Amino acid sequence: MFNKRVIIKDLLTWEPGSQEVTVMGWVRTFRNGQFIALNDGSTNSNLQVVLDLGKYGSEFQKRIAVSAALKINGTVIASPGKGQKLELKATSVEILGDSDPEKYPLQPKKHSLEFLREIAHLRFRTNTFGSVFRIRHALAFAIHKFFNDKGFLYMHTPIISASDAEGAGELFKVTTLPLENIPKNENGSVNFKEDFFERSTNLTVSGQLEAELGATAFGNVYTFGPTFRAENSNTARHLAEFWMIEPEMAFYDLEDNMNLAEEFIKYIIKYAVAHNREDLEFLTQRLEDEEKHLPQDKRSEMSLLQKLEFVLQHEFERITYTEAVEILKESNYNKKEKFRFPVTGWGMDMQSEHERYLVEKHFKKPVIIRNYPKEIKAFYMRQNEDGKTVTAMDILVPGIGEIVGGSQREERLDRLEQRMKEMNIPEKDLWWYLDIRRFGTVPHSGFGLGFERMVQFVTGMTNIRDVIAFPRTPGNAEF
Ligand code: ATP
Ligand code: MN
């Protein structure tokens, strides 16, 4: 059997007592012809492996290069050196895979994140990305655990969709029509009757509408899957392919919805803080080092771990959209014309600089804004009695801005139909969505959490391209 290896993360917790073990992993460094720092991806910490001096010939030693894959048998002993409790005294070393140091692009030094993006197939082998992706994994697991423990049903909504009802962003078309010879109707439009689905289809921008169908049968459901938006916004918080968590709950009003969202966000942060201590400590240090060259007033007031603890210990601020606009209008920032986009007043769609002002400068903690003008929100949000606003809520967090968008859904058929008419959304495309309001309609609510933005918040990574394995952005679909 090949796979009788001890995982380094486990091994490092042992009491050294001359146990004989096999480990496998990749070389991080090799010093003095004697000390190998071996990493197997289970933890940021390397296992120190000690070779008998002179036991291996110089040809063999040369092959113990950065990122070479090794299988090592040895005995676990207390380490006389500083920095580790134990080490592995090697009895045999086998090279499973060589790594030519002349060609290997990663060296044991600091590389820029931009450079690492170009070699995203190798960047997992760095400490930073090791930590980021172990945390990403833990957050994904925590999300399923949170909802499962609460009795939510995990629902898989379709990736290929025929509806563009949401208007959430530009769509990626899905087609098997020959691009060089597209069949046309007499009036010149594309003849989708000849396409695979005999209609126009696209990659989904959200699983919400289908999740609502599930919620009105199962009570509480959630989706967790990829969504696609061909938005040409080259920002540090937008991807063309990103993962979204979308719970939908029957018998929930907006307040229930906000309560769930806050509990949920705190739960998954708490999970990471409890289970990814080492990785978070590493990323905390990394951020501190990165900010060292900045002037004092540009540095974060709190370290990454302090920020996470702070979020766990404090209630999210809850304000209305109207209050938010007032605060922006009255702010010194606005009076000194420091915003790039002026605060025009009630009805404005807040830009990310406005959102970040509210969370970072004014409240200095996560904020939930509710009751937005209906003109800037989607058709399915429940209309308030004032005739102007809808029961929507966004959650904003420091460093990122919007992380959650949600609402109570319009459950009254006549109101929904009227709003769809006003917004020119054809009823025939959404007959199934309207049916839910015909047969046992109930007050219900839900929200969408952008998974990568959550991972950004927890890891402190400033660019969203660095928290997904292989980012899809305008002009970039490598790997
Ligand atoms: P934004 O204003 O930041 O573009 P949005 O209003 O388009 O966000 P929603 O349609 O409400 O966002 O989507 C729900 C959540 O999905 C957002 O709160 C955000 O966390 C995430 N999200 C939206 N667009 C993207 C994207 N292009 N890349 C990554 N995450 C996204
Ligand atoms: Mn958007």
Image (tube, rainbow, N blue to C red):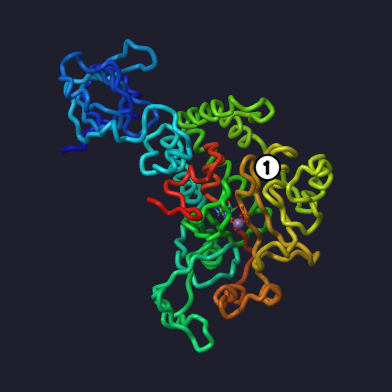
Give the x, y percent position of residue 219. Answer: 54, 62
| Residue located 52% across and 49% down the image | 451
- Report the side of 129 relative to 87 (left or right): right
* Residue 295 versus residue 34 in the image, above or below: below
- Report the side of 370 relative to 228 (left or right): right
Q: Residue furthest top?
A: 80
Q: Secondary structure at mark 1?
A: loop
For ligand 1, give the image quadrant.
bottom right
- Report the side of 60 relative to 331 (left or right): left
* Residue 71 versus residue 235 in the image, above or below: above
Three-letter amino acid code of the residue under disc 1: Phe
Quadrant of residue 364 within the rendered picture? top right
- Tell me, yes or no, if residue 317 can be seen here: yes
Q: Which residue is mark 1?
A: 316
Give the x, y percent position of residue 150. Answer: 52, 50
Quadrant of residue 61 within the rendered picture? top left
- Tell me, yes or no, if residue 217 can be seen here: no
Q: Can you say which quadrant of the picture contains the N terminus?
A: top left
| Residue located 42% across and 43% down the image | 118
Quadrant of residue 42 within the rendered picture? top left
Judging depth in this view, the residue of 389 and 104 nearest the camera is 104
How dense is the environment of label 1, judged by Cα within 10 Å: few (below 14), some, or many (20 and up)?
some
Give the x, y percent position of residue 208. Answer: 55, 63
Judging depth in this view, the residue of 379 and 127 nearest the camera is 127
| Residue located 51% across and 34% down the image | 273
